[in-house]
Amino acid sequence: MCLKASVAPLEGALFLRENGGRFWIAPDVAATFARHRQLSRWRREAGGVILGRWILDTEDVVVDVVSEPGRGDRRGRFFFHRERERAQAIVDDAWQSSLNSRVYLGEWHTHPQDVPSPSSADVDDWRRIAHGAIYESQALFFIIVGRSALRAWQFSTDKGLGILHSSPSPLIDRVVATSR
Ligand SMILES: [Zn+2]
């Protein structure tokens, strides 16, 4: 792997929240997402939990750690069910190793679509997770990694489900372009 001088440096992916806050996916995480894209017919869905930080005194959120598929997850071309206990251990570890600043922010998974859209099962899942989770900051985030675009949604207790806007889009192409 080598970086070419003529391309932009890895910059992650930036989305805007409807309250004006930013939702930033750190470069390492964006690169992890890019690696799991379902670019070939036999690749199965991947997914995991997303972890990061709420920036103090702002509405900004940074995603800087994600879990990747592992033992116990059930994966197919069109589904991903993550095993609960391993993910919970990752969340607990992140919390402790960050001196209680890195928290559970939500979930990610891939789709074999260029520009991904959530299935009705995804939306049901997200609702269930959001209602079941104890989260302090009133919102959880859900990311779907498509073959060429990365999209993100937010579920908040007051506004329900809403898409996060990014500019420019799709950013995942830049992430991939820089790692070739
Ligand atoms: Zn899905």
Image (spheres, grey):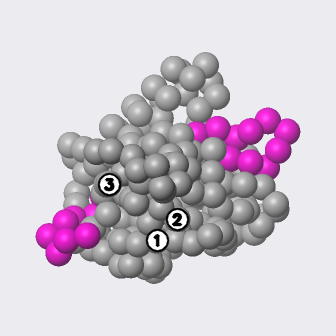
Q: Which mark is residue 96?
A: none
Label 2 crowd (10 A; few <14 / some 14-19 / many >=20): many
Element type at mark 3: loop
Contact? badges 1 and 2 (CB < 8 Å): yes
Q: Where, by quadrant of the figure, is residue 112 drawn?
A: bottom left
Element type at mark 1: loop
* Residue that appears at 45% across and 26% down: 93
Label 1 to label 3: alpha-carbon separation: 18 Å
What residue range appears in magenta? Answer: 39-61
Q: Is residue 16 left or right of residue 105?
A: right
Label 3 crowd (10 A; few <14 / some 14-19 / many >=20): few
- Report if residue 108 is visible in the image: no
| The C terminus, quarter of image | bottom left
Residues 141 and 156: in front is 141
* Residue that appears at 38% across and 78% down: 114
* Residue that appears at 39% across and 46% down: 3
**Type of amino acid at the residue the image marks with label 3:** Arg
Query: Which of the two discs, 2 and 3, sits closer to the camera?
Result: 3
Q: Which residue is mark 2?
A: 171
Is 110 part of what is drawn in magenta? Answer: no
Label 1 crowd (10 A; few <14 / some 14-19 / many >=20): some
What is the residue that sits farthest to the left in this orientation?
A: 42
Q: Is residue 165 left or right of residue 95?
A: right
Q: Which residue is mark 1?
A: 149
**Type of amino acid at the residue the image marks with label 1:** Ala
Label 2 to label 3: alpha-carbon separation: 15 Å
Q: Which residue is mark 3?
A: 180
Q: Where residue 16 appears, x then y in whole percent?
A: 71, 63
